[in-house]
Image (cartoon, rainbow, N blue to C red):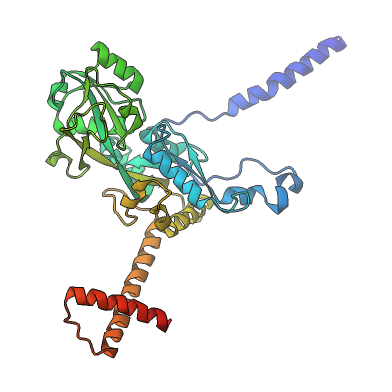
Amino acid sequence: MSRMGLSVLALCHLLFGSTMAQAQTAPQPQSAHQAPARTSEQPTGRAQGQENDNLLRGQTKVNANAGTVTIMTNRTLGGAIMTATLDLSTLLDDGERFEKMRVLPVVARGKMQNLWDILYLSGIDLGFLQTDTLEFLSDDPQINLIKEKIRYIAVMFPEEIHILARSDINSLQDLAGKKVSINAKGTGSAVTGPVIFRRLKIDAQLEYEDANRAIERMRSGDLAAHIYSLAKPAAPVAQIKAEGLHLLSIPFSEEFLDLYAPSEFTNKDYPNLIPADQRVETLAVGNLLAVFNWPENSERYRKVARFVDAFFTRFPELQKPGFQPGWKGVNLAAVAPGWTRFKPAQEWLDKHTQQQSSDAAELRERFNTFLAERKTTSSVDSSSRSELFQQFLDWQRKQQ
């Protein structure tokens, strides 16, 4: 064989040999309905020499990644969920190059897809899920295993259910037998829509459809309604012109007691869709900041635990001006029925609840000492007691 022929064979081996070997060993994609089996992740390669692993000023890749957590959000860039994640990043990012703590928002497809991404997607630590997700999956054969693999950190602020309908649709019952879009596959609306219709026993033809296409289909008469799950006032809804469209009322009833809270829309929320003298009833669905249930001795567990401690410790700062107002309605101790809290989060709450109780008891004891020194009885009226308490605070400062 000629030298040129040998060269061609060698080149073919270099080009195709490694590709074929990789193709033979490439893992197959995992079905969303297979049992979740995510395990603690290990580094995928070795550093090529210490000098390549070191960053400037003595930092290393290990240090840079140890304090970083990723959070799956949603596609509504100006919405409450995305803004909350940006707030966490603004507050918690720490270090000269944010190596101590860094929060990375990941723009996600939607809150239903967030569940699968937390279970299966490499590099994802946290994500926002709706509180009605388990109800949506109640018939899934893997539901118990999913519940075991997912933990929540905190109950976040709720979002309202918007059902935009044609003008000839006057009630939810009018949607029976008609085409209704539950938004794109993987979104929160695709969770809540089916649950609402199932609870009310309304047999609508539910379809996945992007919001913009759904609006055009409604205007053409091909679609009866479209569902959004967004915090009010939601920019995508506020931009819609009312020509032949309106927000459909969702009356609160006993079918929703365990899942949703009553809410409403007014002209102040959507002047483009609601007259000044009208209100539209609706439901609010809760959101959870969730995490994979990592083994306690794993690096991923420790990393998320560090985030939880920083988040909970500095939480009062999020309720001050400069961050979105929704934080003022968040109660870190709020419980999500049917879900299990991430152990470090529960331990933090238990510890600080005990500390607050101890502090309150000490404060009462010091107040009683203050009253005793002044020979004041505890039977004074509330207004006098309030004034005495202010005097007590001044006295306590002097004591300290």
In this rendering, position of residue 279 left or right of residue 356: left
- Looking at the rendering, in which quadrant would you find the C terminus? bottom left
The residue at the point 17 percent across, 31 percent down is: 249
**Residue 226 in picture, x, y percent from top left:** 26, 24
- Looking at the rendering, in which quadrant would you find the N terminus? top right
**Residue 14 in picture, x, y percent from top left:** 74, 21
Q: Which of the two residues, 209 or 123, is positioned nearer the viewer here?
A: 209
Is residue 35 among the parts visible in the rendering?
no
Quarter assignment of residue 358: bottom left
Residue occupying the far right of the picture: 3
Q: Which of the two residues, 72 or 79, is positioned nearer the viewer here?
A: 79
In this rendering, position of residue 274 left or right of residue 330: left
The residue at the point 25 percent across, 40 percent down is: 284
Mark count: 0
**Residue 39 in picture, x, y percent from top left:** 49, 45
Q: Which of the two residues, 266 or 43, is positioned nearer the viewer here?
A: 266
Quarter assignment of residue 225: top left
Reply above or below: 124 against 13: below
The residue at the point 26 percent across, 85 percent down is: 371
Q: Which of the two residues, 254 or 214, is positioned nearer the viewer here?
A: 214
**Residue 6 in picture, x, y percent from top left:** 82, 14
Reply above or below: 399 against 327: below
Is residue 130 among the parts visible in the rendering?
yes
Reply above or below: 295 against 84: below
